[in-house]
Image (tube, helix red, strand yellow):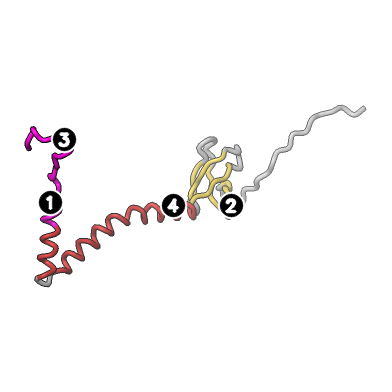
Amino acid sequence: MNDNLPKFLQYNSSGLGCWLSAILIAFLLGSIGLGWIVNGFLILVAFLAIAPVLAFWGLQWWLKRNLVQDSCPTCSYEFTGFKNAEFRCPNCGEPLKVEAGHFRRLTPPGTIDVEAVEVSAQPDD
């Protein structure tokens, strides 16, 4: 470029030739009946631009439907787990499963859960 011209008069057209070539090729393909190639390319570019947004929304929807946040029935540690899955409490290691949106202990058949109640011993007066 001419270094004698002021900076505001200099024009950088490095990317302009590429765009003009692409537009010229698109018009040429359209004029000889191959416009479907240009349309297919534009549809592909639009799909590649929209697909990440749709995937993000789909992932959020799936997570809202399949994650359950509750507390462990044994140690009351609150954490998140997947529906219809068996897992262990990260705090106490108790095997758990999700039933009706809440964590339940995974116990063998015939096991009876009891809650211990602390009773203070007071002498009778």
- Quadrant occupied by the C terminus: top right
- Tag 1's secondary structure? helix
> Given the image, on which type of amino acid does mark 2 rest?
Pro
Residue 7 - label: 3
Q: Looking at the image, is mark 3 or mark 4 earlier in the sequence?
A: 3
Q: Quadrant of residue 124?
A: top right
Q: Residue 74 at what x, y percent from top left?
A: 60, 40
Residue farthest to the bottom, as pictured: 33
- Tag 3's secondary structure? helix
Q: Which residue is mark 2?
A: 109
Which residues are drawn in magenta?
1-22
> Given the image, on which type of amino acid does mark 4 rest?
Gln
Whole-number angstrom distance, CA of label 3 to CA of label 4:
50 Å
Q: Looking at the image, is mark 2 or mark 3 earlier in the sequence?
A: 3
> Given the image, on which type of amino acid does mark 3 rest?
Lys
Identified at 11% across, 66% down, the residue is: 29
State yes or no: residue 19 in magenta.
yes
Residue 60 - label: 4
- Quadrant occupied by the N terminus: top left
Q: Residues within 10 Å of mark 1 (few under 14, many from 20)?
A: few
Q: Looking at the image, is mark 4 or mark 2 earlier in the sequence?
A: 4
